[in-house]
Amino acid sequence: MVYLFLLLISFISHWVWATNFSIVTSGDWIYQDPKMLQEFWAVPSMWSQTSLGAINIGISFTPFQLVYSLLSYAGLGYGLSERLVFLWPILIAFPLGSYLLIKKNINNTLAAVIGSFVYCYNSYFSLIKTGHLTLLAAFAFIPFVFLFYQKALEDKKVFYVLLTALFGFIVSFYEFRAFYLLCFLLFFYAIFYAIFLEKKYTFKSFIKLGFFAVIPLIIIFLLNAYWLIAIGKTGTLVSNAYFDRNLFGNEFLNILSALSFHHPFWTGTKTAVFEVQPIPLYFWLIPFLAFLGLYVNRTNKYILFFGGVAVLGIFLTKQVGIPYTDIYPWLFGHFPGFNAFREASKFYFFIAIGYSVLIAGFCDWLLRHWKTRGFSRYIKCFLIVFIACLFLWNLKPIMTTEIRTLFITRQMPEDYNNFKKFILSQNTYFRTLWIPTYSRWSMYNNSHPQISAVMAINSEWNTYIQDKRTDKITEPELLAQLLNLPYANQLLDASSVKYVVIPLEDKQNEDNFFTDYQKPRQYYISLLDKLSYLKKTNLGTKNILVYENKEVNDHIYLSSERDSLKKKGNYQKVSFQAISPTEYLVDLKNIRKPVYLHFSENYHPGWKVQIASDKWLSDDKHFQTDAGLNVFLIEPQDVCVGNSSCTIVLTFKPQTYVYIGSVISVVTFIILLIGLIYFFIKKKNAK
């Protein structure tokens, strides 16, 4: 009955997620077209076709992307798919996992229910429900991991080791940063358990404890070998788009927000992004109850551990706030992996799991020590209900949908359907450039990647305008300067940009991002209308404006000279076939003179030309163009020796590590499942 009660609250309060199959999308949570999702049904790709191409940092998401792809092939709509992969697992795992974990440490049903409310319905988790579902899903499953880890250390049973590994793997592929926090939580608990909770203090017992403490993590890392080996070998494990960002949000987080467990953007109604909100007075009851729970249970070692976790969370979540303002920046710059947390709000998780146990501990003490008769019984009941309501009140904007974001159903404008049909009707490779940026509804796939103009001028194309940047110039003005450069046409040609698109002002779906960039939509229309190298094209869309670049280069082509932005070589078409984002077959014919093979992906030394099964083009013949792309010098003696035509393979060599890692991951997963089935049957028969 308790489980049913918790699930009813979860599903009824999130009725938009529970009662229909409509699309929900907001913020960073964007719509993904089923045709695009089907491309995930393959071996994980080390190279992403995003923008002009890059190392695929999101490769760790592969398991749930494969499920998405399978559901898409089965004909399920995106709305139902996102519920099966994210929304419903979150609604189920959050209350059940947190309740079971707290019940394990408190051993009081009603207190565990209250603790579950603290974990599930605090302001931080309520706020990230508006767009950060990968992170939310990971936090939903973490209580299961910690619960089974506790049982593994206490009971010394392999069955719990395997369960810890399985649920830990789920956390890791939903959001590896959440898994990073989980690793520290498990590490601290293993040390704490060895010092304060282990009953036998012998060398043999500590070796056995170490085995049960470490093996779950080893299994999880083996399950993640499909991407960890490749990312590690390319050096992007310590240097990538997530890790290379600067510290952010110092003005938003402080010790008061952390201590009161109040997210600075939480208003209790519609979220105020990047607007610090005053802390409601009643939020100060939360730390009071938590530390009261710590005090009255100070002899309970489990409570002491979670109290320490809460204090650690408060200290880290304050970021650069007083006291000790320099510690977070030092950790950000020196501690391995810490630079993935450019802002400290994710450490609210430590406060969430700490406070949930501490407040449950106070409720347990209250229920056990206060009299059950007379007026005291009513006071006790009132206090329990009041504590529950402190957190259940955060459900109000979700139930009323006044929080909007992912609690308002969306419908794709018909213009984007028409644009999708037009794009998919073309078999050739090309990119689309969206100005100022792409819509959440825009269609793209491996054959037709999309580029966000404002993102490009801050990354790949920054080099062409960096000397023009000032504090006063806006991003749209920088974009205008880029598109008016003498070689702008050649830059688009080299980058295989065939269409330049201005999206809708989609106010109905809150996808009107023109207001974010300080210029109206007409500004961009006037800008493109004046560019002679672009021609406005009618694709059957009413409001989406599309401009065609007539002289676009193929994804792969030949030239007698190295192309540059100032001088275009003798362009020659070449026949090629895309096997995957990391492998292309290129047919060469009658190579009698040296030629240059151009490849419009961002330059990376991992791209290689395989001439024969055991022969590779020398690395000193691989160059970076002034557009930042790949070009290879092909000489007659290198290829087609004695033949008028031959086929070479253009491949991203680090993909080999993905194949190796995938074999390790799949074998480990199969062994894990066999082990779980074996020990489950053995445990059942023992009863």
Image (cartoon, rainbow, N blue to C red):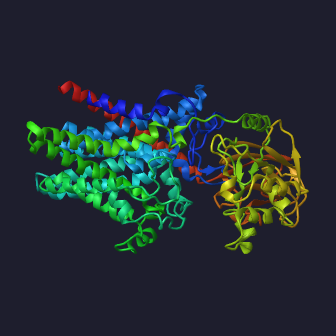
Q: In the drawing, does residue 396 fall left or right of residue 61?
A: left
Q: In the drawing, does residue 132 fall left or right of residue 596?
A: left
Q: Quadrant of the N terminus?
A: top left
Residue under the image location 66 percent in, 63 percent down: 459
Point out residue 576 in the picture as x, y percentages from the top left corner.
Answer: 78, 44
Point out residue 503 in the picture as x, y percentages from the top left corner.
Answer: 74, 46
Residue under the image location 80 percent in, 53 percent down: 522
Q: In the drawing, does residue 226 fall left or right of residue 150?
A: right
The answer to whether residue 223 of the structure is visible from this angle is no
Q: Quadrant of the C terminus?
A: top left
Please, is residue 402 above or below residue 197 in the view? above
Q: Quick one: 595 or 569, which is closer to the camera?
A: 569
Please, is residue 20 above or below residue 234 in the view? above
Residue under the image location 51 percent in, 38 percent down: 407
Point out residue 21 in the picture as x, y percentages from the top left corner.
Answer: 54, 28
Residue under the image location 67 percent in, 41 percent down: 441
The answer to whether residue 59 of the structure is visible from this angle is yes
Point out residue 300 in the picture as x, y percentages from the top left corner.
Answer: 14, 52
Please, is residue 604 above or below residue 413 in the view? below
Q: Quick one: 233 or 322, which is closer to the camera?
A: 322
